[in-house]
Image: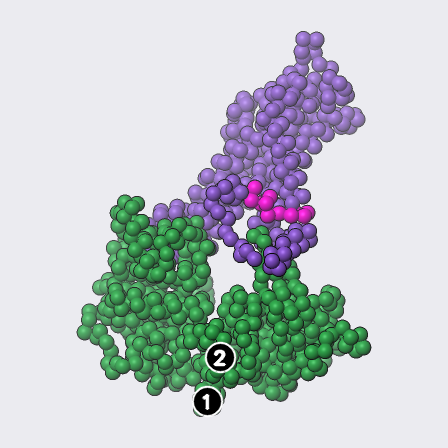
Chain colours: A green, B purple
Amino acid sequence: MKHSSAASPSSNDAENVLSIQGLNIDFVTDAGAVPAVRGVDLHVKAGEILAIVGESGSGKSVTARTALGIMAENGAARGAVYLNGKNMLTLGGHELRAVRGRDVAMVFQEPSTALNPVYTVGWQIMEGIRTHNKISKKEAKARAIEAMAQVGIPDPEQRVNYYPHQFSGGQKQRVVIAAALALKPKLIVADEPTTALDVTVQAEILSLLRDLREELGTAIVIITHNMGVVADIADRVVVMNQGKIVEQAPALELFERPQEDYTKALLAAVPHLGRDSASAALTQRPHQDAPVIVEAQGLGVHFPGRFGSPGFTAVKDVDLKIHAGEVYGLVGESGSGKTTIGRSIAGLNRISSGSLKVLGYEMASFKERSFKPLREQIGFVFQDPAASFNPHLTIGECVAEPLAVHRELNPSQSRSKVNELLEAVQLPAGFAQRYPHELSGGQRQRASLARALALDPKLLIADEPTSALDVSVQAKVLELFRELQSELGFAALFVSHDLAVVDQLATWVGVLYRGSLIEEGLGSKVLAQPQHAYTQRLIASLPVPDPREQAQRRALIEELNQASK
Amino acid sequence: MTTPTLPSSAGSRFKSLPVISHLRMSSGLQRGMLVAGLVLCAVFILSALLAPLLAPFGFAQSSDASGDFPRQAAPDAKFLWGTTSTGYDVFSRTLFGAQTAIWVILAAVVMSLFIGVLLGLISGYLGGWFDRIMVVLADAIYAFPSLLLAIVMSIVISQGQSSLFGGIMAAAISITVVFIPQYFRVVRAEVMRLKAEPFVESAQVIGASPWRVMFTHLLRNATRTLPLIFTLNATEALLTLAGLGFLGFGIEPTAASEWGYDLNRAMSDATSGIWWTGMFPGLAIVLTVMGLTLVGESMNDLNDPRLRRFSRKKAKRITQSAQAGASK
């Protein structure tokens, strides 16, 4: 220890598991060096949960990954990253490998790609154990079973021999955590560990991480963009923006007394369940006397399986009505069929049973040729704004595409219409000449909205329009959506997994669970007094960006979980 | 510090051309490979273009004013690379061979490109019975050894004719038939992938007709990888042509000069120690194929940011200039 204490500066206390000092990272690209991280100093004490929060591109992942000595090939780092007194930036390949897994481990975002599908989960947990310890296979397996039991996987003795595809998403993430824990490292770096999971599963994983910290005293660095997750789990929070640390404070203090303007703006942009509800002052369904635009009766959508295997029923027996001028919010977790319903209404999926009338057209006997004239009355906003534009056409051409298909306009007419539309979504007219990749995510989603509204549709279907956006951008896009809706008065089907977002926009909300519509009602009512047990659990699982309130909600989830057992 | 800006549109059109943009973003060993490939290709193209000027004799010339050429003469001042058993000048024939090769490559690749891309686009987007038939046909053609198929095609097409145009077209069409399934497969797979992309769905939701979706939205996105296949297939076209010529199904020596045919003639020479008749056409094939392959492979690596490497020198230069800019 003599030489390492000489090398490490005095501020590196013994209790700091990780200490990052003066870290600068640049990425080398064709267009020159891109600064990713600038002058970052942070420390993680033993047994502490530190959350690094920031929007995409803030440098939070790159910073945290240096703790494992992981760096993209074109990255160049300066500064010092001390893990247990060793500078991870100067260690060579052999020393790095010795440290990884034993002193520090990583949990990745997407559990289904972090596990190798051709090996059993036991093999993958044992791999790390056997790399660092000379022990027999039997002993390693016993330790893998122990690790799996620790993360709450039932029957670890049998399931150690299962393959990743035999686990659900949440259990896969438990396996990844078990693999990270197998060597009892002092520090775990979790990079957006719950982003790919549903809220109910997210709540379970977060409580698992909290329990593990208490049992084993492992320090956890959790990288996230979700302020609710931060409020739920973190002891201390580091807010990053554009590669720099904006603010560092204990969680309670940060949420109650944010010091910096950026932090205040970030917290204000987070949708908060129960605040700012679109149906706050309503007692009955608005627009219920207006003509019905979409009517589903006993709607079922079944996807046939491959030869010999049974198919998958995405939607079963759903009844719903959307009136003219109304915003209908459809909420559910992944696989609940919410997107399928939206796509069926737009004619992208065929329905297999029941009846679905869209603008009076019966979708059960769908023919592209006869449906085409109705298409101009339906706008569609896709989830991923980056993928929903043809990369080879300019924004102007993309927005003009509906006009080119349905209206015969000369170039100058269509140009002025495009400028008008871009102005309506608050984009400068000069953007018409730009290509989609030259716009930011929020700008692209605005353009996408402009395209959907080009023909003054009666119905707009928005499929998770803001889930790919950062919170501050999401807030602006939602505000724009609300303004345009009240101005133009189109009916909208708003599909989202985020209850808080749906409540902000939709007056009438439907909750989907495994293809069935289990609850329907005024947004404020469904969220405040959920009737169905699943809705109750769903709402309780949604973390709110307020540590005190979140602690109460956590108790409520545990109660609900107890009750359901 | 300057933030990286997008290239301005003026003057960037030239820089964004396929090969030139690749050259600009390469460095180190990758740049070396690309430059070597480009030099070999340039030599190949130049010798094809300038063959009539550079070559001292015609490709089918076996005598001049001073009488018949010596047969199987070793390289000397008059016949730089010696003469063949029929008295042709090896140097001239090798130069003119480049001309034939280029014609065949262009004709074959362009024909298969147009037909293959069109079929792939329609088949991939519309699917249905047309797609099923096309896939079965493409698989059937794949199942044949490509050289065998080329031989059959050249017999069917040329029927023993051996004019310059007929010979080139026979070779080109037989290669085309072999290549159409490749372009078909690549474009079809790309279209099938793109078909599920939101931007195609957003066109469908708008109500765009299938033709509009295919030709304004899919075509340009599906043909991204084609410059690469173009160079790699050019090498295969050249090898197939050489193979055909070697087996005697190529172009007659009096109609055009062809490296594969010359190699075939040189077989018996090799056993009697006459190396020059076989070595030069052989080297021409090897170097041309290598040049095209190097260009194709480097383009492939450079297209993929994960395979693109920055040399240490370039990375250092870029970070240093950024730091210098930051400290100002």
Secondary structure state at the residue bearing disc 2: loop
Name which of mark 2 and mark 1 comes first in the sequence. 2
Image quadrant where residue B293 sits = top right
Image quadrant where residue A52 sits = bottom right
Magenta span main SS: helix
Res A339 seen here: no
Which residue is rendered at x = 35% and y = 61% of the image?
Answer: A426
Image quadrant where residue B164 sits = top right
Callout 1: 10 Å neighbours few (<14), some, many (20+)? few
**Residue placed farthest to the front in the image?**
B328
Tell me how far mark 2 sits from mark 1, CA to CA: 22 Å
Secondary structure state at the residue bearing disc 1: helix
**From the viewer's perspective, is A386 left or right of A413?**
right
Tell me the magenta residue range.
Answer: B20-30
Question: Which residue is tagged 1?
Answer: A552
Question: Which residue is tagged 2?
Answer: A258
Which residue is rendered at x = 52% and y = 24% of the image?
Answer: B165
- Quarter holding the N terminus of chain B? bottom right
Q: Amino acid at mark 2?
A: Pro
Q: Nearest the camera: A367 or B249? A: A367
Callout 2: 10 Å neighbours few (<14), some, many (20+)? some
Q: In the rendered view, would you say A494 is above or below B44?
A: below
Which residue is rendered at x = 39% and y = 80% of the image?
Answer: A273
Q: Nearest the camera: B173 or B37? A: B37
Q: Nearest the camera: A8 or A474? A: A8
Chain of the residue that carries numbered disc 1 in the rendered image:
A
Q: Amino acid at mark 1?
A: Gln
